[in-house]
Image (tube, rainbow, N blue to C red):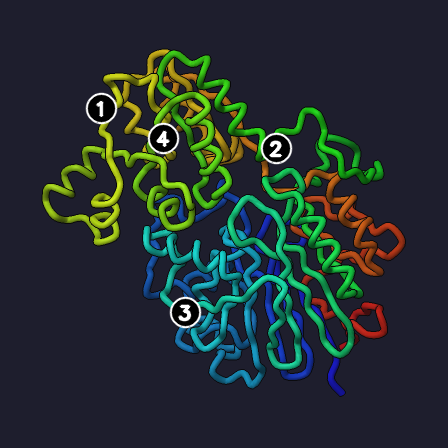
Amino acid sequence: MSKTTLTFYSGLRTIGGTIISLEYGNSRVLFDFGFVYSPASNIFDGQVQQRPSAFTRDYLKLGMLHKIDGIYHKEALLHEPSLLPAQEDQRETAVLISHLHLDHMGAMGAIDASIPVYMTSDSLRLYGALETIGEGVANSRSYQSCEYNQAFFVGDIKITPLIVDHDVLGACAYHLETPDGAIVYTGDLRMHGAHPDRIESFIKSAKAKGFDAVIMEGTTLSGDEEPTSEELVASRLLPSDLVTEKMIPIKMGEILKDTKGIGIFNIYHRNMDRIQGIIEAARISNRKVVLEISTAEIASKLLAQVDFFIYESEDLRQAKANNSLPEWQVKLLDTLPTVSYKDINEHPNEFFVQNSYQHSLELFDLHVEDGIYLHSNGVPLGSFDPAFENLEKILQNIGLERMEIGTGGHAIPQHLKYIVDELDPAILIPLHSFHPERLKSKHGIQLLPSYGVTYILTGGKMTEEVK
């Protein structure tokens, strides 16, 4: 007799890297398939060279990919002969990606091409742009799209994507149903973003479909702000000191109005709401937005409003003169206006210019006197990243003031508790957190799973499988 099982491979007490398997009979889905976010311990530090031809094999050897049967191509299992190759696994398997942050999708290229990998159509549009600019994952393969609120099947498992709000386009939760019951996987979500209505819609849709268990992210439950023994108090209200996504362009606009010189910003360009906010901040302050060419490509493909210039660095100018630009850059430069550092330096106070960490030395060519550097959730995210000290050195070298003006992509603790209380699951499984034990169900039980244990869902309960 078939049974529904859950197995947790990664992401229980880390930020990201969540990989969970739901299986019923001959049907299996995994969600998500990314890497744990830990820049300080990343072996690929810019000196160790990756081998594209051996990506899966090397990552398995390093322990950065998890040993899961029936996922990888047999040629990638040179050092893992005990693992069952995808070609020899008789189960119908698929992988679900909740959103396009590396801690949720960075390893999806390692999945054998015979296994379908699903993401929402919005995510697939964004991924197409990321692949164009060279930010796709290792290995080339196809991906399948799914639509919000439209169910599809992987064997006997029914899957329905539910829209949520996160700081990346296309984010969703998944409602997964088998003959034994149903589970909701929230992915990452927040209530202080540009679309808070999506969270209320998600709660309503999930409750209407019904579920036995909720697998819930808890990123902001760091335990640093208050004792871990203190109970969380649910609230949907926005604290007065919380910066929301909608507030950012207004705050930036006011800062830029008071800035005599150039405005510089550093963002994570997978956040389309932030790019839109940058354009709005420039409008408020009567400045021109200048985007790096990779961000300009994403924005031109995914935003209705194309009201910006492309920064023409000297390297870009020389490549253009030598006819050595990739085709996508040639097309973009034929479509959108460009400005150079010389153009900007004539009137620095008229511009709001993007500068990502990897292009920090471009700042040496700009007149930054009386300017401001608005660090808006761009890389490096904070002092826990070794690159943060390098950024500080560069900014100090040119005397450019840095100001933090951003907001996170994860629900704050009282919002997490509000969402859980509204869902009120019989079984709550918190993860994607350093302190998941802090998030508890209103009336149901809290399950803190362990790696290497298989859990059986039956009769509205979840029990450990006895081997």
Report the residue marked by disc 4.
289
Q: Earlier in the sequence, mark 4 or mark 2?
A: 2
For image coordinates 71% across by 40% down, the residue present is 221
Report helix, strand or loop for mark 1. Answer: helix
Q: Amino acid at mark 3?
A: Ser
- Residue 343 numbered mark, or none: 1
Which one is nearer the viewer's eye here, 224 or 4? 4
Relative to 151, say whether 100 is above or below: above
- Tell me the tag on residue 244: 2
Q: Position of residue 210 (x, y in %)?
A: 78, 65
- Where is residue 232? Give x, y as percent: 81, 39
Occupied quadrant, residue 207 = bottom right
- 116 left or right, relative to 314: right
Q: CA distance from mark 3 to mark 1?
A: 42 Å
Name the outermost residue toward the right. Answer: 443
Q: Secondary structure at mark 3?
A: loop
Q: Amino acid at mark 4?
A: Val
- CB within 8 Å, label 3 to label 1: no
In percent of width and height, residue 328 lies at 25, 52
Residue with the most extreme left position: 322
Q: Which mark is residue 142?
A: 3
The Cα atoms of the two marked residues, 2 and 3, are separated by 35 Å
Q: Residues within 10 Å of mark 3 (few under 14, many from 20)?
A: few
Question: What residue is shown at x 56% (from left), y 86% (from top)?
Answer: 90
Disc nearer the start of the sequence (3/1): 3
